[in-house]
Amino acid sequence: MKYVLRPVSTLLVASMLLVSACNQNAGNKETANTENQTSNTANEVKLPARADFQKTIDGKQTDLFVLKNKNNVQAAITNYGGRVVSLLVPDKNGKLTDVSIGFANVEDYTEGADTFFGATIGRYGNRIAKGKFNLEGKEYTLATNNGANHLHGGVKGFSRVVWDAKQVDDKTLELTYLSKDMEEGYPGNLNVKVTYTLTDENELTVNYQATTDKATHVNLTNHTFFNLNGEGSGDILGHTLQINADRYNPVDSTLIPTGIEPVAGTPFDFQQPTTIGSRIKEQNQQLKFGNGYDHNYVLTGGNAGKEMKLAATVTGDKSGITMEIRTQEPGIQFYSGNFMEGSHTLKTNVKDEFRTAFCLETQHFPDSPNQPAFPSTVLKPGQTYNTTTVHKFSAK
């Protein structure tokens, strides 16, 4: 018998092997492309997972809300404490950078005594001496949660409550909270509304409003920890800072203001662009206590409630990202991360090491309830507390 079909079978097998090899090569290329895409994606900054912020706390539901503008700038905000969790802005090369220091899940925000990261602070931002004040002939006693003093609203200030949230649209989030009479020792039922808006001009605007049924003290602010080079990029000492203030509040050993003094000729003078770290050791030596900047600056341009004024400008030395802060408030607290000690793990799995972030908190002055020379923080029935602060981002 002659096997005349054998050459044909050999040809067929060879063809099949060739096709298989081609398909395998194509598959390898596709796999390699997929791996590259995955690798590239892994290197891109991302917002935390929404599911990691969905939890019931004090009988209320927490969540994560994302604002986004046409330039792909994004802000992630949780209603637990009204906190800015992430803030993604482009650097000088167009790469998105998370300039807000924070945690990857809501549970981490509930831990520890000083986790004010990104939070809405109230009723009173900053310190009140010995946790006491006199108002309309009556003395009120607050919690003393910072040594002998009251700090940032007390043991459970606005940073540790679940706000009611309404996402109006892709760029606007409204948060509301009723602080009941004598909560943390403050008189009056205080209805508070905080509105976050992200504009197409790369501005994150925060508007605070409040009304009360009894005279009380109100001083609301936001406590975002910033590193304009991005979380995990190292310390902030190379950032360039300019503060529009020719005066500041010197403080005692418990960080309570002792008056108002000029910044000229002192390490507190940031009227011209100056790196944060250039005089920080000199500042420590001058104070003989403390561990860096944690002071209120008296802003140039009038009292609160009037026109918006430029408060501060700061630029990241590595990223080229610049943040301009405008406000209606009379002061701004500059904090250089002095109490950061690596005790918390952040979104990028790095620790919050010493001076790896700074804060610039627009506000009325610390201890105003006990210092009549300072702008008043009293809110009475029939009045509306209404103030706005804007953070504008650019890069070059």
Image (cartoon, helix red, strand yellow):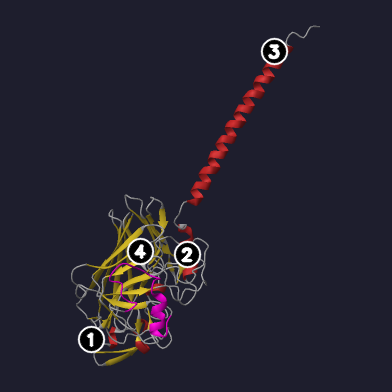
Q: Position of residue 339 (x, y in %)?
A: 45, 76
Residue at point 29%, 74% (across, down): 191
Q: Earlier in the sequence, mark 4 or mark 1?
A: 4
Marks 2 and 3, how far apart at CA = 69 Å
- Vertical order, 155 against 63 (above or below): below
Q: Quadrant of the C terminus?
A: bottom left
Marks 2 and 1, how far apart at CA = 40 Å
Q: Secondary structure at mark 4?
A: strand
Residue bounds of the magenta highlight: 266-290
Q: Position of residue 306 (x, y in %)?
A: 18, 71
Label drawn at residue 234: 2
Q: Residue furthest right?
A: 1
Q: Quadrant of residue 370?
A: bottom left
- Disc 4 packing (10 Å; few <14; some 14–19; many ≥20): many
Marks 4 and 1, how far apart at CA = 37 Å
| Residue 337 falls within the magenta-colored stretch | no
- Disc 1 packing (10 Å; few <14; some 14–19; many ≥20): few
Q: Earlier in the sequence, mark 2 or mark 3?
A: 3
The answer, for residue 123, to whether it is visible in the render is: no
Q: Earlier in the sequence, mark 1 or mark 3?
A: 3
Q: Secondary structure at mark 2?
A: loop
Residue of label 3: 8
- Disc 2 packing (10 Å; few <14; some 14–19; many ≥20): some
Label drawn at residue 165: 4
| Residue 288 falls within the magenta-colored stretch | yes
Amino acid on which disc 3 is placed: Val
